[in-house]
Image (spheres, rainbow, N blue to C red):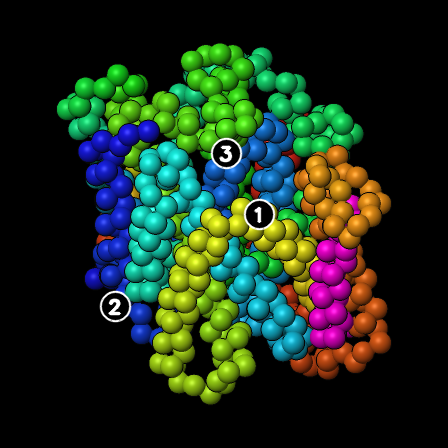
Amino acid sequence: MHLALPDYLVILLYFAVVLTVGFMIKYKIKTTNDFLMSSRSVPLWITSLAFISANLGAQEVIGMAASGAKYGIMTSHFYWLGAIPAMVFLGIFMMPFYYGSRARSVPEYLALRFDDKTRSLNAVAFAVMTIFSSGISLYALALLMKIILGWSFEFSVFMAAGIVLIYTFLGGLTSAVYNEVLQFFLIVLGIAPVVFIGLHEAGGWSGIVKNLPEAMTHTWKNMGSVDDNPMGVNGWGMTMGLGFVMSFGYWCTDFLVVQRAMIARNMSAARRTPIIASFPKMMMPFIVIAPGLIAMALTNAHAGFSLPLKPDGRTDFDMALPSLIAHYYPSGLLGVGVTALLASFMSGMAGNVTAFNTVFTFDIYQAHIKKDGTDEHYLLVGKMATVFGILASIGTAYLTSRFNNLNDFLQLVFSFVNGPLFATFLLGMFWKRTTGHGAFWGLLLGTVFAAIFHGITVAEGKGGWLGFNVYEFHSGMGQAFGVATVAWTCCFIFTILVSLITKPKEEKELEGLVYSLTPRLKDPKNPVYLAIAMIVLGIILNLLFF
Amino acid sequence: MDKLTDLRFIIGLFFSLSGVVLILTYFVVTQSNHPQMNLYAGCVMLLFGLFMLLMFYKGDAADA
């Protein structure tokens, strides 16, 4: 892929805009609240788009196209089953506690609801995960740019990290959120042309159906057995593992996305943020998954395009989207496509860093190191945490480049840590008897049992590291869903058991933090009807591609 | 400065300029690889950019 002057013009225009945003917002940053929480004054349309854009990093854009090429339309389960219900649940049931408690972060909610040790466990795990995620995103960016444009690893890493550092250091969360929204439109407008032209070349949806195996063009039809679909997961595993445990664990508890709703102007807007965001979210498969299906259909049809192969001769699914862009885009539009990819990588990194600096400042530094500092002091700490986050991301990117298996290992550890989270929040918000000790031990034991379960099961040659194998999964994805389900179930059970033998907080302390002790909200813009509409739309999409 | 940091203005400006670059590329640069895509995508981006700028000016007038 060779870039020409018009391509570089678009890329430079994007860089100029994001840097200018940082410099202009800098003058609005006066307090820690401005820098880390955007003064809770961001309009609803921005928080809604930022909510899904924070998750629309490069791994998502490249990875979902790759999954589309590998598994077909079943990949849309990650949206229509694995996101929409959880986003609606967050808006209706959980935002009132996050926003109403005036917590500045998700770990701080845990401190208010439970105790400091539960907060610290969540905060440290989250801080470490965000840094590694940011570094892996940076590594993936450098790798992709090396493959498609021939840019050196060092140039890509320092160029991307430098730009993200400048605009997040200057403009804080507002700057990151603005760029996320810009990135959302860039991805939609930059990738949509490849979908249109690819669909045309493939002969429309009917052409795709003709050139792909039947199992790749249905979402649910072949989920009766693990043998009948390319994902190797059955309906129960998909619904429980992805649709409930992993989905609710991510969308309802991960501060990276929840933070975007927490900076809305008022409670009503905070509740509607994830619900409104669920509409573009359910449309995203047509932008990010469709290219994968198109690439595979064109390859099978021998229609002048074929997916590249890896050195070992296997199909390189990760190149589905970049190779389509390189094949079909003329100079100019190619620049828009490359900018969309760059924006998704950089925005993903900025999202992680701005979530990290907030959790570090409020939940680690202020909670444990200096409790009574001035606002100027915490603003400085927030800015230093931003610099540290970027430097640590660069370090992680280099570490990942030296140890090939580090990425897989970290993803595995993240799944152990994330699996149990939703059980803790569910019990904490809806069962007033849940105690801090119960939450802490539930989280810890949920993570431990997730690791043990992975150690005694095998899938695609992975797992079974405890030396014996009690069950073999049909696919790695099935194993991941199984691990998440075990983590959630163990956390749920241990939290209840430990809570029953320990002393709960006084009811007075739990007002506004637990469902049964919180007065019902009287919101003139009741989001329930909107939520029902989104759920119905999600069901219709599932039925259309059943 | 507040007006310039309105996200509608930023998005509008970026996509209007990008759209103009693509349209100019279609007319100025000879290409064999689906050159009409630059024209179509450029027009869509320009229209979207102008729409966002319009929203910005309408919002600005309403605020005033």
Residues beneath discs 3 and 2 located on the same chain: yes
Instruction: From this view, report whether residue A268 is shown above or below residue A148.
Output: below
Q: Which residue is mark 3?
A: A318
Which chain letter goes with mark 3?
Answer: A
Q: Which residue is mark 2?
A: A27
User: Does the residue at mark 2 contact the one at mark 1 (Cβ under 8 Å)?
Assistant: no
Earlier-in-chain disc, 3 versus 2: 2
| Quarter of the rendering containing residue A175 | bottom left
Residue A296 vs residue A24, the one in the foreground:
A296
Residues beneath discs 2 and 1 located on the same chain: yes
Residue A306 vs residue A540, the one in the foreground:
A306
Residue A60 vs residue A390, the one in the foreground:
A390
Which secondary structure, mark 2?
A: loop
In the image, residue A1 lies at what x, y percent? 33, 29
What is the three-letter code of the residue carrying label 1?
Answer: Asn
Q: Which residue is mark 1?
A: A405
What is the three-letter code of the residue carrying label 3?
Answer: Asp
Residue occupying the far bottom of the picture? A372
Instruction: From this view, report whether residue A167 is shown above or below residue A477.
Output: below
Q: Which residues are magenta?
A: A431-457
Residue shown at the point (51%, 12%) measured from the top left: A301
- The reply, left or right, for residue B46 in relation to residue A191 is left
Residue shown at the point (78%, 29%) measured from the top left: A225
How far is mark 3 from mark 1, CA to CA? Answer: 17 Å
Q: Residues within 10 Å of mark 3 (few under 14, many from 20)?
A: many
